[in-house]
Image (cartoon, rainbow, N blue to C red):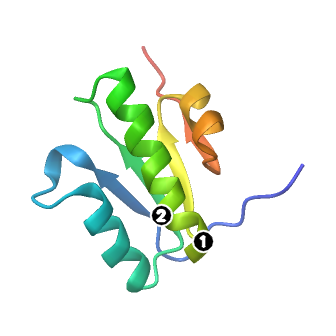
Amino acid sequence: MKRLVLPRLYVILDAALLTVPETECAQKLADAGVRLLQYRNKRASPRELFESSRELVSLLAPLKVSVVVNDRADFAALAGATASTLARKI
């Protein structure tokens, strides 16, 4: 198993807080040196979340930016993301 080494800057891209398109924000973050980005979109439908995840991975993978998809390991795997986070429900 490949070990994930975390970079010094780990950004959580929360779609609910954005005023610009996700891809535009992600591109600017990559240009600024971000190498690990967690994508979070609690308001998206399953289809929207998958499509956005796939689009972000396609944009960022060639730039050597790892993408982590929030809450959906299946979407992370299908989109080619590096990993997924799974929320703990208490």
Q: Which residue lies furthest to the right in this view?
A: 1
Residue nearest the observer in this picture, 19 or 6: 19
Q: In this view, does 36 lie above or below 80?
A: below
Q: What residue type is labelled 1?
A: Pro
Q: In this view, does 38 lie above or below 79?
A: below
> Which quadrant would the C terminus be assigned to in this image?
top left
- Residue 80: x and y in percent read 64, 46
Q: Which amino acid does label 2 sit on?
A: Leu
- Do the residues bearing badges 1 and 2 touch, measured as CB atoms within 8 Å? yes
Which numbered disc covers residue 62? 1
Quadrant of residue 4 within the rendered picture: bottom right
Q: What element carries label 1?
A: helix
- Residue at the image position 48 percent from the left and 23 percent from the top: 88
Question: Between marks 1 and 2, how big is the CA–CA gap?
Answer: 7 Å
Is residue 61 left or right of 37 when viewed as pictured?
right
Which numbered disc covers residue 87? none
- Residue 62: x and y in percent read 60, 71
Residue nearest the observer in this picture, 79 or 2: 79
Is residue 88 left or right of 1 when viewed as pictured?
left
- Residue at the image position 71 percent from the left and 66 percent from the top: 5
- Residue at the image position 44 percent from the left and 55 percent from the top: 56
Q: What element carries label 2?
A: helix
Q: Which residue lies furthest to the top in this view?
A: 90
Q: Would you name the residue on which mark 2 appears?
A: 59
Quadrant of residue 85 within the rendered picture: top right
- Residue 69: x and y in percent read 49, 42
